[in-house]
Amino acid sequence: MSPRLRKYAKLLQSPACWPALLHGVAATLDHDVALGRDRFATVIDVGANKGQFAVYARTRWPKARLICFEPLPGPRAKLARVTRGQAEIHDCALGAASGEGSMHLATRTDSSSLLALGARQKAIYGMEESGELRVPIKRLDACLPTPLTRPVLLKIDVQGFELEVLKGATDLLPNVDAVYVEASYVELYEGQALHEEIERFLIDAGFGLDGRFNTHVHQGEPVQADLLFRRRTSSMREPKP
């Protein structure tokens, strides 16, 4: 069975994910490998797109406060439909400073970015830019007052802009227990920070790298992976039965 078929077979075994499937949104249950034994009271979903991770989070932690950030109107409308009033949705991008920026729209919307698509992104994933859209940019610190109810998970999937999001969250990060961030090993977007810079920033902020998941390899070379960082003093795991 192909990975795609395995993914949908697992979704069909999860009734809580069915309503989102009717809207064309497949919950990213593959994140259970990294996060399935954790418990979170607050989940911050940066780069929520149309709700793939948000639906997973609502299924995994149904009582958690779910806060989503998505600047693109089309995906954001679908995100609102699939979360059914159970998420706080912010209509902005996040970065190191507040202002405005041009979102480079990709032919696959979940690959749109505040950075221009690079040659390797276009070649490896077979896509092009389809236009630009001006969007508001805010610092995460300005959007969420602290303290938040802990444990807190910060998930970031922003197509090369990850480090800028983290730089805009320096006040919030001491209240975060885990950061789950998609990072690149090669430049896919022009001028993006690669995984080494992201790791260094989070280690300096008091986190330790706990694992690398869902690694995408192209022609024998790692391209992207989901990196899980945990605050060194936190305990978020469910007790073993």
Image (cartoon, helix red, strand yellow):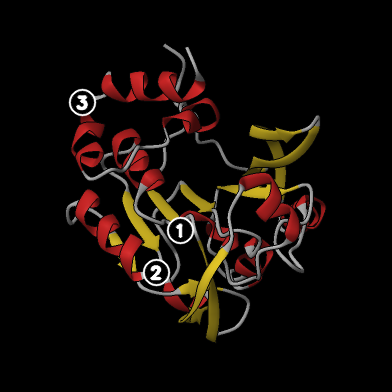
Label 1 Cα neighbours within 10 Å, binned few <14 / some 14-19 / many ≥20: some
> CB of mark 2 within 8 Å of CB of mark 1?
yes
Label 2 element class: loop
- Judge by depth and name the residue closer to the eye, 97 or 184: 184
Label 3 element class: helix
Give the labeled residue for mark 3: 15
For badge 2, the amino acid type reads: Leu
Q: Quadrant of residue 222?
A: top right
The residue drawn where x is 76% and y is 50% is 195
Any mark on residue 109, and which? 1
Any mark on residue 139, and which? none
Give the labeled residue for mark 2: 72
The residue drawn where x is 51% and y is 53% is 154
- Mark nearer the viewer, 1 or 3: 1
User: Quadrant where the C terminus lies?
Assistant: top left
From the viewer's perspective, tell me whether residue 198 is left or right of residue 40: right
For badge 3, the amino acid type reads: Pro
Vertical order, 39 against 142 (above or below) = above
Label 2 Cα neighbours within 10 Å, binned few <14 / some 14-19 / many ≥20: many
